[in-house]
Image: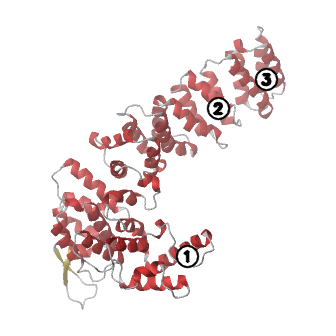
Amino acid sequence: MDTGMFLSLFDGQSKLLVRSLCGTSGVHRALGVFHRQQRANPQMSLSNLMETLCQDEITYPDAKDQPLTVKPLVCLFPALFKQNLLSFIHLVQSVLPRTTVLHLLKCLSQDLHPSPWVTALVRQLERNLGAHNEEPLYTPLCSQRLKELSQRLVGSGETEGWAKCFSGQPVESESRRTSCLSELGTQRKRKGSVVTLDSDGEETGQQSKRIKMDLCGSECLNAEEQSAKAEASGRLGSDAPAETPAEELQPATDSSCDALPEHIKVSVLQIKELLESQTEWDQSSMEVFKVLNDCDPGQVEVLCSMLNFPDLLEQTLPKLCSSIFGPSPDFSYSTAATLIKSLLLQKVLFLSEPASRCLVAAVMSLCSRYPRPMCHVLIGPVLEEKNIGNPQAELLNRLIEGCLDSHYRLLVLQMTFKIAWSEAVLSIIHSLLDSKPDLSEELFTQFIEQLVSKGPQFTKSVKFAKMMLTVLTKYSSHVTAAHKHSLHGCLILNETFLKKSLQAALKRITHT
């Protein structure tokens, strides 16, 4: 049944939460909305949402010969919404009265055909609330299927590993229940052996783990449950809400994500909600980015990965960059380099047409404020790219002309000595020379050596000829007798219409 038809029953704040809870990533979206509502109104309550979900509604049967029935509104929502709702309640349980949560769970028990995940979440919440529900978290059907799977895996009919969790014996303790549940829903997180087939070593153990995961995925879960599995199973396996937000964002996060401080995890959820919103950002919204001031470079890298910065739309970049870099004091080199690389590098490398105004604005603003990390993590990697084209060259030329001072132009020029030259790279070198950086005698000599060695590849290149003409006219005072001799041999090979002009310019250089 379409959830849209129920939205009119909720008040404004509750309606936003209901919308957020729809979809496979509904939990962290709803948590972000809830935190924003709390900031706007510290006295806000979830009581209206819970009361509306528990109110009775008349349901119309699919077949005409069946009678009308009355069920709590929450039972009429799809299974995925119920899973997200229960997981959300697990996170905000501390702000909800115990009786309110138990009343909602009682309403959900009236659902005639609950999904296995909803059943497990309900029972887990009942245990958390001290309702003394000793029923296993899994359904009888799931238990039977996993017994069969365990028997197939052990081969001999012995009960080990998973089978111990489904032997029919009462659960001895909360830690044992959590352990069994973790084995059901989060096989990928387990470190030890689950079922010992033989002792042939690590390769056999890894192969058996893959077999177990594939079989369980094909037999125990339907399509909808698979989409929500990673999100719900991580929460069920732990009674500590503080660790849950990281799992919601990335079900398969590594240990570095788990090591983030709690306030950074909460800020990640808020930033993600802000990036996904279609509304304008106000000053209070941008305050959340100040968390970057509390992060070390490693934490910044994890945060960028969790927020998928490389995949952000270009239209978001200007306001995101102004929010991150504007009000903050200068970041360290490592932090700035990580942010620039994550936000910009992939977008610049993949340019197939001139950069958009949004991308140009973001690149130039960051280059003006952080020129050194920009040179090392953006300009350098772009120059090293073999397939660099005119779009990349045009963007780098704008940075050279508008953002980099002489010191950093020299740094970029030295970078070109270590890469293969192409027509696009020639235009960048030409732009660098036109900007008249303060070339030392040693650096100019290195550049002349590069010109002479690469000249035979560009005998018909007009760009190369124009660059040579710039050297002979704007840097004539740097040319020594040795340079002149080397350049004379290079010009003999030139086949462009500028050959005579080049030879004339070289001839006019008389001081040695």
Residue 211 is marked as: 1
> Quick one: 430 or 238, which is closer to the camera?
238
Q: Residue at x 45, y 35 (%)?
A: 361
Residue denoted by label 3 = 499
| SS label for mark 3 | helix
Tell me which amino acid carries mark 1: Ile
**C-alpha distance separating marks 3 and 2:** 28 Å
Count how many numbered circles sit on residues in the image: 3
Q: Earlier in the sequence, mark 2 or mark 1?
A: 1
Q: Quadrant of the N terminus?
A: bottom left
Tell me which amino acid carries mark 2: Met
Residue 261 as seen in the image, left or right of residue 12: right
Q: Quadrant of the C terminus?
A: top right
The label nearer to you, 3 versus 1, is 1
Residue denoted by label 2 = 415
| SS label for mark 1 | helix
